[in-house]
Image: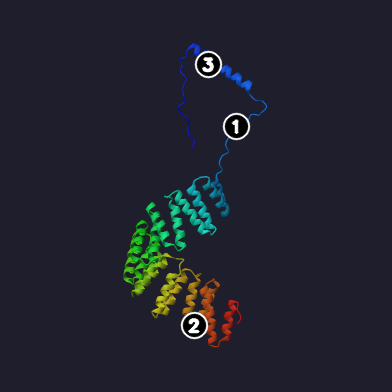
Amino acid sequence: MNGNMTGQSRKPWLRTFWRRATMAGMITLLTSGCALLRDYSRLEEEPVAPAPSADWIARGDSAYEREEFAQAVVWYREAARHGQQEAVAWFNAANAMVRLDRNGEAAEAYRRSVRAAPGFLKAHQNLAALYHLDGKPADAARHYEIAARLDGTDANARYRLGELADQLGDGAEALRWYDQALAVDASHEAAASGKARIHLAAGDTAAALAWMERYNADALRASRPAGWALMLQADLAIASGQREEGLRLYREAATLTADDARPWLRMARVLRDAGAPLEAGIALRQGLAADSSRGELWAALGALRLEGGDPLGAREALVRAFRLGSIEGLQGLEMLADWHERRHEGAAARAIRGILGLRK
């Protein structure tokens, strides 16, 4: 630490004549004596200013930005050794170790970081996450709880505590933490779906459905409706025997998630299972009208056509799916080839395998 020197003595302004004369004589004697006694056989050393300390943190940051993570670890450790922002140095070193898949060493570095700064929120969060990944729920929970205490707005820590409780089979504790996460962030998707899952695990589909109805109603009032939540409510409505309500919700979800084929696929499956294949095909066609590049919809349409006794229509749809890169299209064509073989229609089977680039 640098400090300012204070309290220097001041010479009195009033001196007697003889005092002045005495002091002048002493100064003359001392200066002349210094000149006479100096040893000129030895060179006088020039004063050397102390070398500035290296900024190890900055060096580590530079290496990290270049994705030289191993070198970054070296510099950050050096910073900690020199006492340069020790908590930050260990935290940054841990982050670099995670990028190197050295999670055990990273956890130790995070522990050093929180020892140096017990209130370091991000270090607690990351350490909790590593413990969670490493299958140490008690250690993970301890640091998630610290994070939750340090930051009243940390919805993720609260959600993770609910998730851990859920994994340990404590549904009541899981619900308590999920509710806390939602109190911080009303749109927290994982906490909302977690609550529904807890009710389902307890065999209470009605409670899960009631929860999702309330969640979606609140989201709609807040002008933040979510397609995934509507789909989940639709699934629960279908499971509760409310088919028309489920289909309505799937359609709403489809309008919100233009790039998601799942609402159309689920709608088609429900209609097919209800013995309405024509309506199922119409639903798939509606999805394809919105986006004809959805390979999974073409594959579902191909499967539906094959079930309806239209192998040529099935082949056309499955080829479209395959050429769009859909794994379902590939699987559908393989099944269609096997179907033709079982019917002793070798030419048709070979033609399909030719499309796939196969020979059998």
Q: Which mark is residue 247?
A: none
Q: Quadrant of the C terminus?
A: bottom right
Q: Residue 228, percent across and down?
A: 41, 66
Whether residue 268 is visible, yes or no, is yes
| Callouts 3 and 1 close, C-beta under 8 Å | no
Q: Name the residue under label 1.
A: 47
Q: Name the residue under label 3.
A: 23
User: Please, is residue 80 above or below residue 262 in the view?
Assistant: above
Q: What residue type is labelled 2?
A: Asp
- Seen at 45% across and 71% down, the residue is 287
In which image quadrant can residue 210 be found?
A: bottom left
Q: Number of callouts in the render? A: 3
Q: Residue furthest right?
A: 41
Nearer to me, 187 or 63: 63
| Callouts 3 and 2 close, C-beta under 8 Å | no
User: Please, is residue 193 above or below residue 314 in the view?
Assistant: above
Q: Residue 344, percent across and down?
A: 55, 88
Question: Is tag 3's residue or tag 1's residue first in the polypeptide sequence?
Answer: 3
Judging from the image, the colouring scheme is rainbow
Q: Mark 2 points at which residue?
A: 310
Q: In this view, does 346 lie to the left or right of 258?
A: right
Name the element at disc 1.
Answer: loop
Mark 1 to mark 2: distance in Å?
97 Å
Mark 3 to mark 1: distance in Å?
30 Å
Q: What residue type is labelled 3?
A: Met
Nearer to me, 257 or 118: 118
In which image quadrant can residue 136 be found?
A: bottom left
User: Please, is residue 334 above or below residue 146 in the view?
Assistant: below
Q: Residue 219, percent across and down?
A: 36, 61
Q: Is residue 172 left or right of residue 256?
A: left
Q: Give the foreground label among 3 and 1.
A: 3
